Amino acid sequence: MDAALDASLVRPYVRAWLAEDVGRGDVTTTTVIPAEAYARARLEARESFTLAGLGVAALCFELAGDQPPEWDPKSSDGEEVRPGDVIARIEGNLRTILTAERTALNVLARLSGIASLTARYAAAVAGSRAKVVDTRKTTPGLRVLEKYAVRVGGGANHRFGLDDGILIKDNHIAAAGGVASAVRRARAGAHHGLRVEVEVEDLDGLAEALSAGADAVLLDNMSVDEVSAAVAANDGRALLEVSGGVSLDNVAGYAATGVDLVSVGALTHSARSVDVALEVDP
Amino acid sequence: MDAALDASLVRPYVRAWLAEDVGRGDVTTTTVIPAEAYARARLEARESFTLAGLGVAALCFELAGDQPPEWDPKSSDGEEVRPGDVIARIEGNLRTILTAERTALNVLARLSGIASLTARYAAAVAGSRAKVVDTRKTTPGLRVLEKYAVRVGGGANHRFGLDDGILIKDNHIAAAGGVASAVRRARAGAHHGLRVEVEVEDLDGLAEALSAGADAVLLDNMSVDEVSAAVAANDGRALLEVSGGVSLDNVAGYAATGVDLVSVGALTHSARSVDVALEVDP
Amino acid sequence: MDAALDASLVRPYVRAWLAEDVGRGDVTTTTVIPAEAYARARLEARESFTLAGLGVAALCFELAGDQPPEWDPKSSDGEEVRPGDVIARIEGNLRTILTAERTALNVLARLSGIASLTARYAAAVAGSRAKVVDTRKTTPGLRVLEKYAVRVGGGANHRFGLDDGILIKDNHIAAAGGVASAVRRARAGAHHGLRVEVEVEDLDGLAEALSAGADAVLLDNMSVDEVSAAVAANDGRALLEVSGGVSLDNVAGYAATGVDLVSVGALTHSARSVDVALEVDP
Amino acid sequence: MDAALDASLVRPYVRAWLAEDVGRGDVTTTTVIPAEAYARARLEARESFTLAGLGVAALCFELAGDQPPEWDPKSSDGEEVRPGDVIARIEGNLRTILTAERTALNVLARLSGIASLTARYAAAVAGSRAKVVDTRKTTPGLRVLEKYAVRVGGGANHRFGLDDGILIKDNHIAAAGGVASAVRRARAGAHHGLRVEVEVEDLDGLAEALSAGADAVLLDNMSVDEVSAAVAANDGRALLEVSGGVSLDNVAGYAATGVDLVSVGALTHSARSVDVALEVDP
Amino acid sequence: MDAALDASLVRPYVRAWLAEDVGRGDVTTTTVIPAEAYARARLEARESFTLAGLGVAALCFELAGDQPPEWDPKSSDGEEVRPGDVIARIEGNLRTILTAERTALNVLARLSGIASLTARYAAAVAGSRAKVVDTRKTTPGLRVLEKYAVRVGGGANHRFGLDDGILIKDNHIAAAGGVASAVRRARAGAHHGLRVEVEVEDLDGLAEALSAGADAVLLDNMSVDEVSAAVAANDGRALLEVSGGVSLDNVAGYAATGVDLVSVGALTHSARSVDVALEVDP
Amino acid sequence: MDAALDASLVRPYVRAWLAEDVGRGDVTTTTVIPAEAYARARLEARESFTLAGLGVAALCFELAGDQPPEWDPKSSDGEEVRPGDVIARIEGNLRTILTAERTALNVLARLSGIASLTARYAAAVAGSRAKVVDTRKTTPGLRVLEKYAVRVGGGANHRFGLDDGILIKDNHIAAAGGVASAVRRARAGAHHGLRVEVEVEDLDGLAEALSAGADAVLLDNMSVDEVSAAVAANDGRALLEVSGGVSLDNVAGYAATGVDLVSVGALTHSARSVDVALEVDP
């Protein structure tokens, strides 16, 4: 899936966020600011980052009231912005602009934070065959958006949920009585459009997975040397994914082993929101 | 409001999160694990942190299927846990346990991360009259829960949305033609149960706000020395809140000035998820 | 908050009301009236009243079908209308007009009834410092709209719910072990943007509330003389609100004592719907 | 349909009302009252009225939190209560009781008001063949409940919406080119389980309706004498309904003419909420 | 009700169906087809059938994304189409067209199947006084649409649900202690706009129903001869409906007896989807 | 995924279906049958079929009112029942039983119809390596349930929607400029847990797909001989699926070729509802 995110998909999110923040009405704005007040404003970067979520922010302003302001984007998702860069201009009813401000900034800062962190990981593996992929360690309720931000940052997505991908983990294997049995059951029970991926912890596990016919193998918490050995042992048969203990310091080493995928939970569970602000022209 | 969070309020969130992760069904679990498989499992800390969200995690297991497992908490929100500590024991249908696992861990890790960061700020201001308070820089859709985690960590809450508190900022002031006019309008238009708080950037602004009758004043981006001067100038008339540029390094200094509140956006926008895991007993 | 009511807030209400009335379809209209029938109609006052809810009525016609009629308002919320006055003209598909008619009239009649009753109370206190305010004794499900009608009629709003204002009543006081304890707990636990209001029944209670630092005091079921004494005893320290037993006959007397607020449950729980009708031009 | 109202139907209403009143939490109760506080309380009549909505009030307490109090009804819908009568006893968590109080009282007061007014009309027509029936002039969003209260008060219901009954009014007749054409179209287009009722303004209209085969005729705004003449002219052929200008003063006169139904909009659009209160035992 | 189906009623259905099929996104289309790809396509009949649901199909394309394609209908509901006939042309964003394709075809095929089967029954009774009517044996969740398709095919509707029509069946009669009692209770308890229909199994039942004043009688599982006798016995007093065991082979015979209605469950529970396809112009 | 269907997933469907049928209340039942009437009833087969949806039917009775009857299943999904077989016994409140009856029967009849047709196809391919699989030609809104019925009948599922499986069809190929390009794009853009399946129309297409690295190939509208040739040409490299023109008459022939999957749209789009009834014990 390319990075595009359909606005019709995002609108229900934005409506829920605005309801959360605005509640029964923005009491400060409606009491202090005249109904007809008009303003020009801009979204501005306060630090350097990879932009993600600009279209989502636009929807916050579009849906915050009956008089949506004009929206004039000056950048686009995936671009690198620097402190002081104007990301978008907004012109129209001041009440609407101020009521939507915090919701728009919150989502833009979070998604850009994820894209920015992903971009650093993606840069670190450049030149290798490995893709940086996300995990299911996303903020509850925001998975589709956070995985979009990963794509914007140059990463790839892992499965979106428990229903569109198979990943057999240690507890599944134990309950099934072994790797071979678990892989066989998944293959028999799941629809044929899904690959069977299985998590292993060492080379013996890999061997067992390969002989069981796994389509992909997740190498969990292995050292770079172990992963190199796994790549050699695999000999191109299954997709290989590295997971566990990956950081910006060691990701290039893992990528250089020849694995196909390096999954990084930190992309979504530990990204910091970037600093972005709305300024109203005087 | 004390830290308690009513389960009836949280269930709709949990249902939505489970729907996001489980979708049309957990294909790995339902194909690999027998319907009647039974297991004992435990939630376990992998690092030291302040626990928050244990009751929310419990609901994830309760609502993940028709056969909710038994839930036996071994800790409680607000406690400090250490690596290896068992936080809760879970016993019952293995499919249900594994299907709920990721959702439960995601929310527990995020809320505990916020509580843990808050606890560090709260410790830093201990002994002063200042409370550490949160902001509206929360994750879209999770505000009520994130503000709960702040309380668990020993912080206090600022307003929950745009409708249950008044905060007049620079753009409001500009549109109203000055601090006095803005305060007067808010006072006249808002219901009498809300205080009027106004943001100022220097001592002149404070003076103007006080003479306009503001109930509370937010001192934005001032140095510790400026804040000290503001406390003196205020002489107990309005509540004083410090905001902007506050970090763990300088929060004690701000608190020592005698202000009432120090608000910290980082509590919610930059907290890192803690490391917590679910282990199934062999 | 000024009287404005954002259409984006009201549309979900209107959709629910239309669903309630129209159900699976307006069987009379769709069987008797040709799909293309076109008509001019008018909303007309049948008695004198203060208009409220005209924009809400407009949305009923706008959302009743795929062919919304033209809407041409001839009055506006807050205006006094007389029998025979045309409030709005509506022109377009006759089926849509007739299907929306009852829903539009019901809400317009109810909101105008509230505004009209409020206007009588507001007129009675004119010249005093007191505002007439509403209560939470509203029709379940319609609070935001009914409080809007109070504003239209010249009244002010009390808190909108249990979360945007503090009002400590007798049962709270009893459970807390006294006024002082209750006020202290509320002040410590609630966010700083909320004032603490406490209900008392006599001058002793007022004294206790004042010394406990209450921001506002509700004088419950006191006579005009007692309220006068309370105003003197308060000496400008707390906001004073009169409540209980207020009627059109005695409201002026209460207002003349110098209290700040007189709350009247009857504004919303006992207003009568006004008489307004839709007429189709022959 | 008998007067019973299924709880499964009412719960979604109650949840929405509680959300409206409680919002993000009852800040007074949760800050002032200990989580474990326990109390006995009672619902008590403050005036004489016909009780309606007791089961609905019970649901307000049941759904207000995780610790629903015990509910012990001391009366039942349809009973006449007097000032001081205990309607129900409630025992349990005090926070829950106080949080639910206003919502429960609001709906109980409103539904009892409707039942009480209906009971007065029903008493006035006792001994005649006429039933008192309601109209669609109900509070938007509460029709099913308000029509239940009418039944409790001894009235009968008219159609519940535009889809479960046919009523051809003047505008329909005009658009159809006459009574005969309108009746014919409705008969041909509507499913056979619905009767065709048509509104007429005089005896000529009645004659035309009868010859067109109408099953029921609404006599709109006719005097008692005209209605008597209509009853004679009808000679038992169609159901006859009187509507328009009916009051407690004249309803007996209309009923004595021998009509089948007298519809009264005031039952729902002009009923006053009764006075009922919750008292906590000391 | 005429055959028209308001788009505002249908949109919520279409949104739910698209969510069911598209889920988190059409992965094939978004990965394979460029975002800006543009195409011309057509809906084409692959067999002969009575068209129903064309407007519903249009909504599937309209609501499938942010770039709805142009829709140019070449036929209309109720028309007979033949293999190869172009039903509509669609031109615009190719991703949107392909994402909506299956949902649009599924509903169009199903509704047209119902209309086509209904048309065969309607043709079979042409010339008689009997209408072919549907039942409540519809697909759960699709009743309003399936009953629309019946009207398109030339049939008439029976009641839409349990609330807009009365049909007393054998179990009701048994519980009420006989036909007379059951009819009397329904007449007393239901609002006067509903007719009372009662199901009987033989001529004795019919006689009892007629003397009890039933407005309509459903003759269940009777032979053509029995129905003829029932028509004679009824002598125009009640509406007569035949039900049970009706097929295309015998429907004409039943219709010829002079009954008013023949209800056929097969119209909705056993219709086969027609063959219709979407073709993209090369 | 095995055949199990979690009740927590199905309840929202059942609630919506009951709302569709019951609307504002079952007027016949509530007027004719006493509130306390008690009965024993049974679900009974009227023809031979493969049972599917018994648990779904149970939920219809469970959720139809405040007094759910006892449910005692006498068969289970997947069993073959014969005319007269008792499928379940139901005992309890008669109103509830009768109100839920039609909804329960409708879904049971439809799902059993699908399972029964699937069972015939599954029997026809028994002994071959081929599985019978469904398609996305399901009833809008019922896909999860209909695919469950296919599993019950011994079939397997294809993808559940556009997001959990990749199927590149002719229009995708044309827009991508060929099979190789389309496969490459899907592989690069989709997450690695999904296989890439591509539709071809002849052996040349198969060859192109195989050399492009497709994981699965759908052989569209080929004869049995062509499919045999395709199996030989494939030589075990990709999964092979036959689709188009498959009927009960020829499915065995296709299965005998050695293909992996035979997909049959008729399983869901053309299954006939089976005959099943509810009988109340006298």
Image: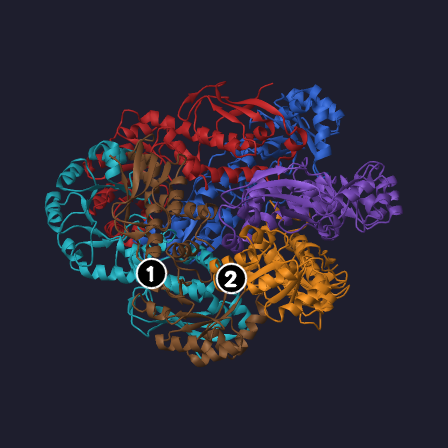
Chain colours: A red, B blue, C purple, D orange, E brown, F cyan
Res B282 seen here:
no
Residue A116 in the image: state x and y as whole percent: 41, 27
Of callouts 2 and 1, the N-terminal one: 1
- Are discs 2 and 1 less than 8 Å apart at CB? no
Name the kind of residue labelled 1 in the image. Ala
Q: Which residue is pictured at 63% across the width and 47% down the height?
A: C279
Q: Disc 2: which chain?
A: E
- Judge whether C98 appears above or below E183 on screen: above
Residue B269 point in image, percent of width and height: 51, 32
> In this rendering, does residue F228 appear at all?
yes
Quadrant of image for the C terminus of chain A = top right
Residue receiving disc 2: E164
> Could you say which disc has been placed on residue C178 in the image?
none
In-front residue for pair F170/D7: F170
Disc 2/disc 1 C-alpha distance (Å): 28 Å
Q: In which quarter of the image is the N terminus of chain A?
A: top left
Q: Position of residue F220 (x, y in %)?
A: 19, 46
- The chain holding disc 1 is E
Question: Which residue does the image show at 88% across and 43% down from the upper left?
Answer: C228
- The residue where tag 1 is placed is E123
Task: Determine the secondary structure under disc 2.
Answer: loop
Q: In this view, does A221 lie to the left or right of A270?
A: left
